[in-house]
Amino acid sequence: MNKTAMVLYGYGINCDYETEYALKAAGFEAKRVHVHDAIKNPGLLQDFNLLAFPGGFCYGDDLGSGKVLANKMKFRMREEMGAFVNQGKLVLGICNGFQMIAKMGLLPYNEFVQKTTLGANASGKFEDRWVYLKINQKSPCIFTKGISELMLPVRHGEGNFIAGPEALNDIVKKNMVALQYVNRAGELAGYPFNPNGSMLNIAGICNEKGNVLGLMPHPEAYNSVTNNPYWTGFRDRITDWKGAGLRVFENAAQYLDEKF
């Protein structure tokens, strides 16, 4: 099977079932794998073509969001994950998953040296809202190919994207910024449209090849049009009942169909 996905779960990850559902809806053979089993037997990774880090509060975010699992996987699975990415396989980190792959250094350079982080929301509180997103059309990101805009939910306390000047300039220069928070008119705007104060309104970044994506909004949580709080206002115009978030997973499936 070319569309096989490992969905991590355990120790506070709580969006694994949603992520598994979205992947299956996009045509994947998805399997939830406990993080203990993945770390104990890193060779399991070679049975899959997509590795998903779902949202949640892994290890309670006690040492910082995603930090504990990021370190455990970095030091126990570094070679396997590096080879996985270099083979052109896919990695998707959503919310807490984005925090993990950023802090282990899988993003943005697959060098396992941390260059970016996700800090506490500038609002000083947990943000649970739907946001508007502009997709960078020049980005190499496989997951967002052909998508110009999205509306997705966020639910996090530490989503403030931060990077040093050198890393930030390189990410922008190489079009590794995949998604940005915008207002209803599609323009960069402050709070509440940028829910966490992220630099340059960054909601997600990819690596240079585009096969690794980390984003704070939850595409798996928009798997049916009825997930959208405004769906009753446009239900008479609905011709496709799939949620727009599924397009992220369908793009991944199409890429794997063509590559493997």
Image (cartoon, grey):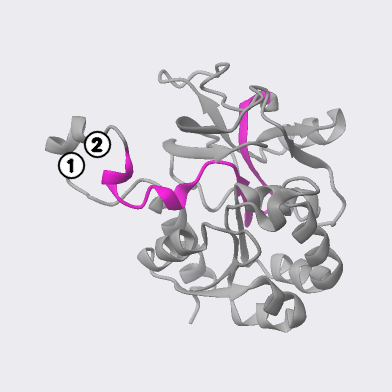
Q: Amino acid at mark 2?
A: Trp
Task: Read off the residue under disc 1.
Answer: 238
Q: CA distance from mark 1 to mark 2?
A: 9 Å
> Residue 167 placed where, x, y %?
82, 36
* Foreground residue among 82 and 98: 98
Label 1 element class: loop
Whether label 1 touches label 2, CB < 8 Å: yes
Quadrant of residue 159 in the image?
A: top right
* Magenta residue check for 212: yes
> Residue 105 placed where, x, y %?
81, 52
173 over 226 or under it: above or below: above
For label 1, count other residues whose C-alpha is less than 10 Å away and answer few (under 14), some (14-19) or many (20+): few
Direction from residue 37 to residue 165 in the image, left or right: right
Residue 10 in view in this figure: yes
Residues drawn in magenta? 200-228
- At horizontal 54% and vertical 70% (from top left) the residue drawn is 259
